[in-house]
Image (spheres, helix red, strand yellow):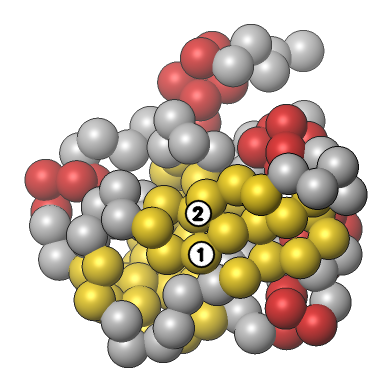
Amino acid sequence: MTVPTNLKYTRDHYWIRLDGEKAVVGLTEYGISELGMIVFIELPDQDTHVSKGEFIGSVETAADDENDLLAPLSGKITSVNRLLERAVMLIHESPYDKGWLFTIQWSQESELEQLWEEETYDREFSLED
């Protein structure tokens, strides 16, 4: 499994690329493999204000499982990857690039301190080779 070193991670299998007060958010390769084949994704609306842990969307798998997407950070959703709703396979083919979910203008700096480095994510889920 790929775990890029330039990203931050959450226990819930989100990757986060920080860029000033904005962050790009996606699902990790490992998280996607744990869900199984994603066949449908519902993403949050742009310009929505969210709190960390709040329901923001869902993913449906080929096994008819529906899983909630919860906000990994508090803030305002500034853009959404609507292409995923039409071409959901991008999340499997390119989870750290074309398969991003949304961007958020984060509002709680203390939440950033709770994000994991790549080594911690690796160790927590025993992803090391």
Residue lying at 30% horizontally and 48% vertically, measured from the top left: 53
Q: Position of 128 compared to 54: left or right?
A: right
Pointer 1 residue: 57
Query: Disc 1 marks which amino acid?
Result: Gly
* Quadrant of the frame with the C terminus: top right
Q: Which mark is residue 103?
A: none
Give the vertical position of 25 relative to 37 (above or below): below
Q: Position of 31 compared to 36: left or right?
A: left
Q: How many marks?
A: 2
Residue at disc 2, secondary structure: strand
Residue lying at 84% horizontally and 77% vertically, measured from the top left: 87
Marks 2 and 1: in contact by CB < 8 Å? yes
Label 1 neighbourhood size at 10 Å, few (<14), some (14-19), many (20+)?
some
Label 2 neighbourhood size at 10 Å, few (<14), some (14-19), many (20+)?
many
Query: Disc 2 marks which amino acid?
Result: Leu
User: Residue farthest to the bottom?
Assistant: 47
**Who is closer to the viewer here, 121 or 81?**
81
Q: Position of 7 compared to 73: left or right?
A: right
Residue lying at 31% horizontally and 81% vertically, measured from the top left: 48
Q: Which mark is residue 69?
A: 2
